[in-house]
Amino acid sequence: MILAALERPTASKTDQAGAAVLEIRDLHVRFGQAHILQGVSLSVGRDPIALVGRNGMGKTTLCQTVMGLNAAAGGEITFQGGSIKGRTPNRVAKSGIALVPQGRRCFPSLTVHEHLRLVEQGRDVSWTVERVYETFPRLAERKTNGGTQLSGGEQQMLAIARALLTNPKLVIMDEPSEGLAPVIVDHLCEVLRGLRAEGMGLLLVEQKLGVATAVCETVAIMVNGHVATVMDAATLLADEAAQNRWLGVAQGGH
């Protein structure tokens, strides 16, 4: 099981498969006078966990800080037992964490195939360019198109494929279903559920509760810069009062 602590944890958490893959403890981030992350604590194990919350709660800042894109003012981040706090983004990526950023961030000057070749790691790995094209046939059809010549759904496929080609141990996805048609979202959920079967860790940041609960059995809720509570996904999905309390509105579907 993947566990997140209530407010301020006092003990280390583990999942059913052993020690947590990613441990965030009492993490603080400040931008000038703004105290964005206020003691975030979260443990991500072998099972996927969804992180939900209203806009402006600090979810994207958390993703970026884990990846080394923001400096932490306090706290600790460990990955597979070793500290990664303060590492540069390239060193975090090399340690085995991949980020699918909000907004996709595809390069207009590179074709789909060039995006993929840029990060491929050879043939003796689980995720190859050939497997990407099998998983996302639309990318194979559009392989000579530039990154910004794709639809929103195609760009998201490309952003996810780019992350998977690094063959990470943990993928952090920031709002992957944003702006996508329901049929694309369904395919996305299917792909993400498959990652779990392969043993790849997943931290899924989502606004859509239906997507979060379709992929993850555990949901951590972020409020005002910290993890306020953790709930069983099915329980939260069925409890409109809890949705209203933590998320502002009941939002059961995609």
Image (cartoon, rainbow, N blue to C red):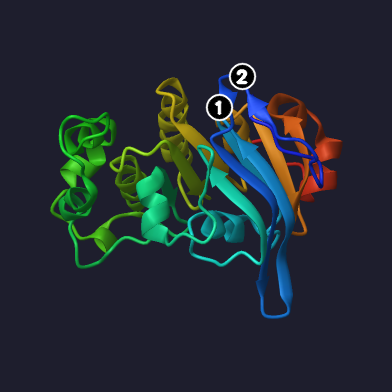
User: Image height check: is 205 above or below 46?
Assistant: below
Alpha carbon separation for disc pair 2 and 1 = 9 Å
Q: Nearer the viewer, residue 184 or 204?
A: 204
CB atoms at circles 2 and 1 under 8 Å apart? yes
Read off the residue under disc 1: 47
Q: What residue is at 86 percent from the left and 38 percent from the top?
A: 241
User: Image height check: is 90 above or below 140?
Assistant: below
Q: Nearer the viewer, residue 143 or 169?
A: 169
The residue type indicated by label 1 comes to Asp
**Residue 73 location, x and y as percent?**
66, 67
Q: What residue is at 18 percent from the left and 29 percent from the top?
A: 124
Q: Is disc 2 placed on a helix, strand or loop?
A: loop
**Residue 1 location, x and y as percent?**
64, 24
Give the farthest residue toward the front: 82
Read off the residue under disc 2: 16
Q: Is disc 1 placed on a helix, strand or loop?
A: loop
Give the farthest residue toward the left: 144
Report the side of 163 relative to 244 (left or right): left
Q: What residue is at 37 percent from the left and 45 percent from the top?
A: 160
Q: Earlier in the sequence, mark 2 or mark 1?
A: 2
Occupied quadrant, residue 135: top left
